[in-house]
Amino acid sequence: MGAVAAVWLVDWMFLERPLSLRLVGPEKTSGEVVLPDHVTQDFEGFSIVRSITSPQDRRVAKAMYARIWITNREIHAANPIGSTIDKYAARYGVEPLVLFHIAYLHSFWGEATSGPVPFLRAMTSEGIRDVVQIHLPGWFVESGLRRKLISGDLLQRLAGPNVGFKLRYALHKATLDVSAQPYELNLLSDVLLVLREYPHEFQDVLGYSGADPVRSALRRSYEAIGAATLQKPYEFPYRITPFDASYYSDNRQDVKKFVRAAYYASIADFDLATRMAALLVVYQRDYYRKALGEEVWAGLPDYQRAAMLGMTRDILTTGVGHLAYNVYVLPEMNCTPVEFVARGAVEDPAFAEVAKEVVWRPTDFALLWGGTTTKLEVMSEVWQTFKGQAMPGIPARSSASASLTEVLRRQ
């Protein structure tokens, strides 16, 4: 039985199309998505769905919505996708389509392509990797050998520039700062940021006094590490003096407790995760507004503002190999990218004019790994589906057909 379980896990962990996927159900490329009545009601009431006029776009939108829903039906039973996103989009004044795009993208991004793994209750292969990563031992994360391999070029000299860089990146990313579904929230560099910046929005977490062990652990560990673990300025981590051994000795256990509690709290509570994701969007929006000036930001087309918020959802590759002040945190994801995009816009004299015609991207946008290529193309597809046209200058990627196949397979 152990051998069978191991083969099953390897099949789903390492193959984009697992050999045993056919056991879930036959592949279907056409058909109607059928949702339970209460889910259909939420879909029909979703603000971004109500604006669709084309029957074909509505079918695509339903496939996208259902792709998020099948990833974890249990959490959406308590907090429906549309009404939850609408609630926080209205409360914080953010574009609901941005939140929907992030949730949709990460319903199949990374290792989650084939959806939930059978018999593992709403866990995708990406989720399995996340669970493994949040339980990495402190001796591995803090290892001197790991730091040397990240900071030096030995791996690239041994394995070549491409494979060597990927190995270096894998070691660099192997911290506890996991990007967790449903919104790819980094458990330290994002969750800590919004808890610190908007504590009044999380009194149900920071003031929790109930019996839930996850919420209790989240509150207690935040009280222990919240003020020190993620330092300002968040977007310039290399300006901060690296933590010494005494920090890790004093805080190691609470950092691990915080990560694990933040992970289980956010993946099990779509309301909490949406609140965190929306406030991260607010923080980055305000960062752009301050960098560009209120008048410039307000004058941008809505697609440009949305694209700039979508660009930051990936690692800034120039950070790979440069350890930040805290080896448990990855500010190279979502903290430094927003400054990279903001600086590029400020330094480009043609930024505002270009943005009126097509989506502006930084000149060296390829430094954002996937953030301004694949992920923006998915955003353009979402934009086209719900607003009737793709983002100008960004081809719409066709992800909906694959999403439909997985939804129909699991109906």
Image: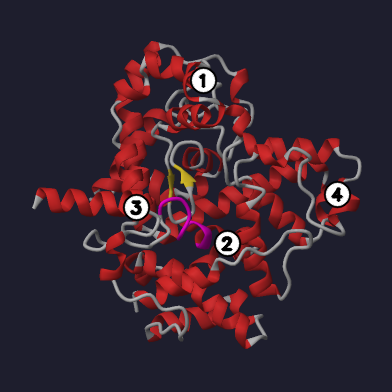
Q: In the rendered structure, which amino acid carries the disc numbered 3? A: Ser
Residue 381 is situated, as x and y percent measured from the top left of the image, at 64, 66
What is the chief secondary structure element of the magenta stretch? loop
Q: Which mark is residue 296?
A: 4
Q: CA distance from mark 2 to mark 3?
A: 20 Å
State the residue position of label 2.
101
Residue 8 in percent (x, y) is at 22, 54
Give the mark nearer the N terminus: 1 vs 3: 3
Q: Residue at x 83, y 43 (%)?
A: 293
Label 1 and label 2: CA atoms lie apart by 32 Å
Hey, what amino acid is under mark 1?
Answer: Tyr
**Nearer the N terminus, badge 4 or badge 2?**
2
Dot 3: element: helix
> What residue do we see at 55% from left, 57% from top?
102
Name the foreground residue: 219 vs 360. Answer: 360
Residue at numbered disc 1: 325
Is residue 105 magenta-colored?
A: yes
Q: Earlier in the sequence, mark 1 or mark 2?
A: 2
Q: Which residue is mark 3?
A: 125
Quick check: is 281 in the magenta stretch? no
353 versus 34 height, above or below: above
Quadrant location, the C terminus: bottom left
* Residue at mark 1 to residue at mark 3: CA–CA distance: 30 Å
Three-letter code for the amino acid on which mark 4 is drawn: Val
Mark closest to the chain's N terminus, 1 or 4: 4
Residue 278 as seen in the image, left or right of residue 245: right
